[in-house]
């Protein structure tokens, strides 16, 4: 396995941390979404895998904010779904390149305000079989009476319906894992299951692996 740094022509995205990459396999484009950069701009960059050039994709509609995000390719709808750092849900239509921001019903996942910036849950993935986005691993930072910070872990799964545009809290059987922060998750759509490993629990760093 060899890594190779590519030096590609075209309008290069500015340096950023915590971005999302989404592959459009039909048009052979890799979109760069979200992330934090010193350059504030509402521009969608894409890497063209046929020409190996960077390009700017003109878009319409409300452009998502910067910051950490989750983003998923939706083959059935020919779209990209993005959950921004403030848990606002956006959809990019890949045929028209129009952004849509949703105002969902229901109770959205709680978000932590660490360093005055929202922090997304630890895990996010697309459950295409059931037409929903799933988020797991929220934590809330609050200041107690002594002025110290308290960290509260929320061990719930939150579902956003792609057709209903509704947030729901899902009931988990078998007991949800206590590791809800800095954990890793791998979802296999073909087997309809996922694996969660590691993370920070109340008792410290974990090496447990759990099957969903």
Image (spheres, helix red, strand yellow):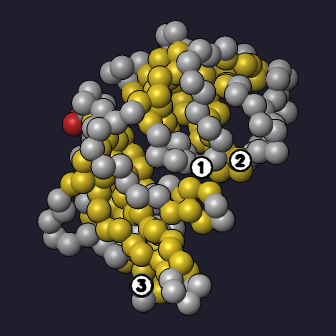
Query: Are discs 2 and 3 less than 8 Å apart at CB?
Result: no
Gap between marks 2 and 1 measured at Cα? 7 Å
Frontmost residue, 62 versus 120? 62
Give the x, y percent position of residue 66: 65, 41
Left or right: 178 as drawn, with respect to 40: left
Judging by the rendered image, the residue that carries numbered circle 1 is 68
Identity of the residue drawn at 60% across and 27% down: 63
The quadrant where residue 137 appears:
bottom left
Instruction: Check disc 1 and report its element: helix, strand or loop.
Output: loop
* Disc assigned to residue 201: none
Residue with the most extreme top position: 96
Q: Residues within 10 Å of mark 2 (few under 14, many from 20)?
A: some
Frontmost residue, 19 versus 52? 19
Judging by the rendered image, the residue that carries numbered circle 2 is 36
Left or right: 13 as drawn, with respect to 123: right
The quadrant where residue 127 appears:
top left
Gap between marks 1 and 3 measured at Cα? 24 Å
The quadrant where residue 198 appears:
bottom left
* Disc assigned to residue 202: 3
Left or right: 51 as drawn, with respect to 206: right
Query: Are discs 2 and 1 less than 8 Å apart at CB?
Result: yes
Gap between marks 2 and 3 measured at Cα? 29 Å
Considering only order in the chain, which callout, 3 or 1, is on the residue closer to the N terminus? Answer: 1
């Amino acid at each position: 396995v060899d890594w190779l740094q590519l030096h590609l022509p075209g309008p290069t995205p500015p340096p950023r941390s915590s971005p999302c990459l989404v592959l459009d396999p039909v048009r052979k484009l890799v979109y760069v979404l979200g992330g934090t950069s010193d350059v504030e701009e509402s521009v969608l960059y894409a890497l063209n895998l046929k020409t190996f050039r960077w390009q700017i994709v003109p878009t319409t509609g409300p452009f998502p904010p910067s910051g950490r995000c989750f983003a998923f390719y939706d083959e059935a709808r020919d779209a990209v779904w993005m959950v921004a750092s403030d848990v606002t849900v956006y959809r990019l239509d890949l045929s028209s390149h129009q952004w849509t921001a949703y105002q969902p019903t229901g109770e959205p996942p709680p978000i932590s305000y660490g360093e005055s910036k929202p922090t997304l849950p630890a895990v996010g993935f697309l459950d295409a079989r059931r037409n929903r986005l799933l988020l797991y691993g929220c934590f809330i930072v609050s200041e107690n009476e002594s002025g110290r910070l308290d960290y509260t872990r929320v061990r719930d799964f939150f579902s956003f319906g792609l057709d209903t545009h509704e947030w729901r809290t899902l009931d988990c059987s078998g007991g949800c894992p206590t590791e809800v922060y800095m954990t890793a998750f791998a979802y296999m759509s073909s087997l309809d299951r996922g694996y969660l490993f590691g993370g920070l629990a109340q008792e410290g760093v974990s090496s447990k692996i759990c099957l969903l």
